[in-house]
Image: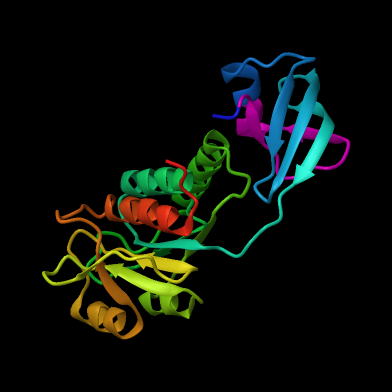
């Protein structure tokens, strides 16, 4: 885990400031003091080493000592997940971010338990993704996209794979990247969704056992990270 790393949306060449949740984390969780050095990331490839110069209840001011930027690349791992209970989505986003997922697409499944997310729930997922980005050492924050229709997934320029628990589904093999893995709800895909998946994607088996709706995308993220060369484990 990177030591004392914080998220700052606007990293400039000389100064930076933290407020809100990041200020609370800096001052009350990590107990950083004036004069201490920390790392800052903006979720867009920038990494800064900065020194805390002032701290009060509303803001932390930092002086940037070094600043580097990693070049961005097109998203390689995309996960499409049906709207589930918030606790399940939180688990997927947190672990998926750690594993290297670049994009999370949330869609309304015909047989799903939910059909949308509230603004508060969406912001909670974004907060968890930021935390997982910092913890895992990533420099790029994954995109979170809300789909209004299942069919929108197939507009993505990526190899579409979907979890197919039926007997005879082919075992997971290294796909052409970028790759989009589409997982279904606990009740499974509807007949209409299966027809669209068979037309536009490839059904794969991730495991010989039946996986829960929140387990399948995490398993897919791990396999895709390994196949793409991201994983060092």
Q: Would residue 154 be seen by someone viewing this image from the given angle?
A: yes
Q: Residue furthest left?
A: 167
Give the residue at x 37% y 48%.
92
Give the image location of residue 213, x and y in percent.
Answer: 25, 55
State the residue lying farthest toward the right: 14
* Image vertical order of residue 145 relative to residue 22, above or below: below
In which quadrant is the N terminus drawn?
top right
Q: How many labels does the image show?
A: 0
Residue depicted at 13% across the width and 69% down the height: 166
Side of 74 where 226 appears, left or right: left
The image shows residue 72, relative to residue 156, as above or below, that is above
**Horizontal side, residue 76 vs residue 80: left or right:** right
Q: List x then y, in percent, for residue 180.
A: 42, 68
123 in relation to 193, above or below = above
**Figure quadrant of the C terminus:** top left
Q: Does the magenta stretch include residue 60?
A: no
Indicate the quadrant where residue 62 lies: top right
Q: Is residue 157 left or right of residue 72?
A: left
Residue pictured at 64% horizontal, 61% vertical: 73
Is residue 10 part of the magenta span, yes or no?
yes
Q: Give the range drawn in magenta.
A: 3-24
Coordinates of residue 227 in the picture (x, y in percent): 42, 58
Q: Where residue 22 sits: x, y (%)?
A: 63, 31
Q: Which residue is drawn at 19% across and 80% down?
A: 191
User: Can residue 107 be seen from the camera position used here?
Assistant: no
């Amino acid at each position: 885990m990177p030591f004392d790393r914080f998220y700052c949306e606007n990293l400039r060449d000389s100064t930076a400031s933290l407020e809100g949740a990041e200020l609370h984390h800096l001052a009350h969780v990590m107990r950083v003091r004036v004069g201490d050095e920390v790392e800052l990331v903006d979720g867009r490839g920038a990494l800064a080493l900065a020194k805390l110069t002032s701290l009060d209840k509303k803001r932390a001011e930092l002086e940037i000592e070094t600043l580097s930027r990693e070049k961005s690349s097109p998203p390689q791992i995309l996960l499409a997940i049906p709207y589930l209970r918030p606790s399940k989505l939180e688990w997927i986003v947190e672990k998926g971010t750690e594993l290297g997922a670049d994009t999370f697409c949330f869609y309304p499944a015909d047989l799903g338990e939910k059909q949308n997310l509230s603004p508060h729930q969406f912001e909670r997922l974004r907060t968890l993704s930021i935390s997982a980005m910092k913890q895992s050492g990533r420099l790029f924050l994954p995109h979170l996209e809300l789909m209004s229709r299942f069919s929108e997934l197939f507009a993505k320029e990526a190899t579409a794979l979907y979890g197919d628990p039926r007997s005879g589904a082919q075992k997971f093999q290294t796909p052409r990247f970028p790759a989009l893995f589409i997982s279904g709800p606990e009740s499974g895909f509807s007949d209409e969704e299966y027809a669209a998946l068979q037309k536009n994607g490839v059904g794969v088996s991730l495991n010989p056992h039946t996986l829960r709706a929140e387990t399948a995308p995490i398993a897919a993220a791990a396999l895709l990270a390994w196949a793409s060369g991201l994983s060092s484990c």
